[in-house]
Image: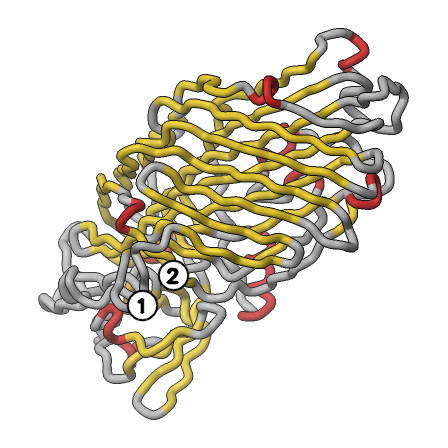
Amino acid sequence: MTCLVVLSTGCGAIDLGGSAADDDRYGFGPRPDDSVVYQPDVVLVDGGSRAIRSVSADGFTYVVDGDARGVDDLRPGRIMFATSEAVGRVVRVDRSGGDAAITLAPVRLTDVVRDGHFAVDQALDLESQAFGALPSLLGETVEETPAGATPAVPDAGQATGIGTNAIGLPDLRLAAPPIVLAPARAPAADPAARSIDRKIGAWAVTAYKDSGKLGLTAQHGTAVSRLKVDFDIRLLVRDLRVSGDIRVTDGVIPHPRFRVDGIEALAVTIAAGAEGGLSDNKKAKIELPIEVKQPIVIGGFPATLKQTFTFLVQTAFTAKNGNISATGRWGLDGPIGYDGSAVLTPAFSVQESIMQSLRGVSIGVEGIVVAAEFRFGLLLGLPVAGAGPFVGVVASLGLTNGSAAGRVGLPLAGPAAKCRGSTLVLTVRAGEGISLSRTLSEAIEEVLKVSIPAEAASLSKDIVNRSVVEPDVPLCQG
């Protein structure tokens, strides 16, 4: 009988993953550990990253050493587990010479593990990370869509669903090959690099990091649209750390715990203007994952610690040559995460009021929403679709600046003339499941012709949800 699970009776003490000092390009391989029992259709492949020859551009086909132990047992329907980033349900097996090309589909953690206990308490040192590259995403589009002739002032409260289809966006994404922060490897990676630039349609995006912050700056501007947007959003951190306790019992995770400590503040700077007014407005969701990618081994079980980052923008300029700008900073004191069904939220404070800096000049009402999600996870699976516990902070900021001319009765929803307003919604989202957007999931299903497990419903709780309108009079309440 073929031995599919290294811990099964008669399998013996086979060292499948090697030591932590081995090649970790695709994470570490699994090693024998009595605390983990795998599902019966899981096939462990010997050699860890050393057994992987290459990976396709889309990240779903792995060319592996055909002589590696376990490869002969791979067939469609089974789950290959070679490393923490080479795990998935086998869709296709193609042999070429002495190698095998294995096409994989995403799986959940409980598809792989039947029984196990995984505890982690790990520092994330951004200074020791280096920028790298992940496989290209499927289903990418680079597209911008006018928001309409008479847009409503954006509602930041609707953008807390950034992981789905926030603020009324159509099914579009502005996407680029993800940026990754990965452990430094000489000579391919440069740990001294603190930023990296990407061009996404009309957007110029810079990701940056150091020991105290991780953030992203985006600038938009074209001669055709005449819309100018320049914003920066960043987490300020100190002694960043993730910890968790995940117990799988008979394929169920009854009471997971996962948290992030060391996030001290969120800071945002926004400046935007539209030369053409209504015709320049945009609704755009930009998926540019930034990952703090750190392979680890828990007992004999390999996993990857990751952080991803997604943001969106919506503008509502109503008059030509309108502009708006503001800067804000908010303190976050305490862990974010979850303990079973209880969501952990940090204490909130205003360190720099965005209303005090809100400026703009226009004969109409101008508005903008910027929303972003910072997500941390302990993941197993494919690089673009890892599965496991995660926790994220969703920040949604909406700004409105009223008409300098004091006009009333514009065809807009929201605050009217001479009013300034801001809405800030900070939400903790947490759960366990595949970290995969609906758009990407549908693209994978179309290409691989298999069903993809949906991301698990997440727990959520607001850290803060507040709106401020100045002056506070009935006219300004719309």
User: What is the quadrant of residue 83 in the picture?
Assistant: bottom left
Quadrant in which the N terminus is drawn: bottom left
Q: Can you give x and y, in whole percent of width and height, for residue 179 in the image?
A: 45, 56
Disc 2 marks which amino acid? Gly
Q: CA distance from mark 1 to mark 2?
A: 9 Å
Image position, residue 459 (x, y; %): 47, 33
The residue at 34%/37% (across/down) is 212
Query: According to the image, label 1 marks what residue?
Result: 188
Please say if 384 is above or below 433. below
Structural crowding at the residue carrying mark 2, measured as other residues with C-alpha within 10 Å and reported as few (<14), some (14–19) or many (≥20):
many
Is residue 435 in sight in this rendering? no
Question: Residue 456, percent across and down?
Answer: 47, 44
Say which residue appears at 45% left-offset and 59% top-offset. Answer: 384
Within the image, what quadrant is residue 50 found in? bottom left
Q: Residue at x 51, y 61 (%)?
A: 177
Q: Residues within 10 Å of mark 1 (few under 14, many from 20)?
A: few
| Total number of numbered discs in the rendering | 2
Q: Is residue 413 above or below residue 213?
A: above
Per the image, the residue denoted by label 2 is 132
Q: Is residue 20 above or below residue 332?
A: below
Question: Foreground residue, 88 or 116?
Answer: 88
> Could you say which is closer to the camera, residue 156 or residue 429?
156
Residue that protrudes farthest toward the bottom in the picture = 97
- Disc 1 residue type? Ala
Q: Is residue 111 left or right of residue 152?
A: left
- For the C terminus, the quadrant is top right
Left or right: 107 as drawn, with respect to 230: left
Residue 109 % position (x, y): 36, 52
CB under 8 Å between discs 1 and 2: yes
